[in-house]
Amino acid sequence: MTRPDIAYAVSYLGRFNSNPAPAHWHAVKHLFRYLIGTMHYKLVYRASDSEELFTTYSDASHGACKATGRATGGYVTLVSGAAVGWSSKRQPFVTLSSTEAKFVAAGAMTRSLYFSSPVLNYTTRKYPADEVEAKREKLVYGVLCSAWLLATLPLPAKHQ
């Protein structure tokens, strides 16, 4: 069984497998109690006539790990409103801003979509080429605006 609602907790607790402290054991017990109390939770997949059958979200928290300064990023992919792919991981390197951390999370999401695209091609409706191009233009504009913002941010003194 797989549960997207505990992805972050499992990712966080997995960092301490080799040397857990009492606080980590307490968190594991809390997670088990949560799982017992939510055994009836399940993913439900239904057919949908919605325009947006396929949706993906990503986000990151800059500097979430106090020990290393690394961000935690994640994403979820929904088909007809139900999760079909998700991840929550500490990013592999320190990012200088929350915008950069969000770009790294979006990159991980994009890689996962690339490998799952053959499956999604069979499960989602086909969009007309002009509609896809319009959505692509909006996405590229948003990415370029964010990249410009990232490039113009001043570096903290410790990184200069």
Image (cartoon, grey):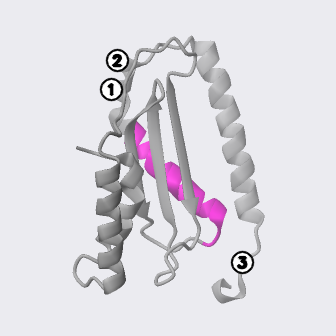
**Residue 81 locus on image (x, y percent):** 48, 28
Q: In which quarter of the view is residue 43 placed?
A: top left
* Residue at image coords 57%, 55%: 103
Left/right placement of residue 160 relative to residue 126 reads right
Left or right of residue 27: residue 77: right
Numbered disc 2: secondary structure: helix
Which residue in the protein does label 3 denote? 155
Above or below residue 149? Residue 71 is: below
- Disc 3 on helix, strand or loop? loop
Disc 3 vs disc 1: Cβ atoms closer than 8 Å?
no
**Numbered mark located on residue 118 in the image:** 1
Q: Residues within 10 Å of mark 3 (few under 14, many from 20)?
A: few
Q: Position of residue 2 (x, y in %)?
A: 27, 45
Q: Main secondary structure of the magenta part?
A: helix
Q: 99 above or below 157?
A: above
Q: Nearer the viewer, residue 114 or 88?
A: 88
What residue lies at 63% left-to-right and 14% top-to-bottom?
Answer: 130
Task: Tell me: residue 148, above or below residue 21.
Answer: above
Circles 2 and 1, Cβ within 8 Å, touching? The answer is yes
x then y, percent, for residue 57:
54, 42
Q: How much space separates mark 2 and mark 3, taking CA atoms?
A: 45 Å
**Among the 4 quarters of the image, the one containing residue 60:** bottom right
Which secondary structure lies at badge 1? helix
Furthest-bottom residue in this view: 158
Which residue is under mark 2?
A: 122
Residue at (35% x, 40% y) in the render = 41
Is 102 within the magenta? yes
Quarter of the image with the C terminus in it: bottom right
Q: Residue furthest front?
A: 37
Range covered by the magenta-colored residues = 96-113
For the residues marked 2 and 1, what is the alpha-carbon distance in whole angstroms?
Answer: 7 Å
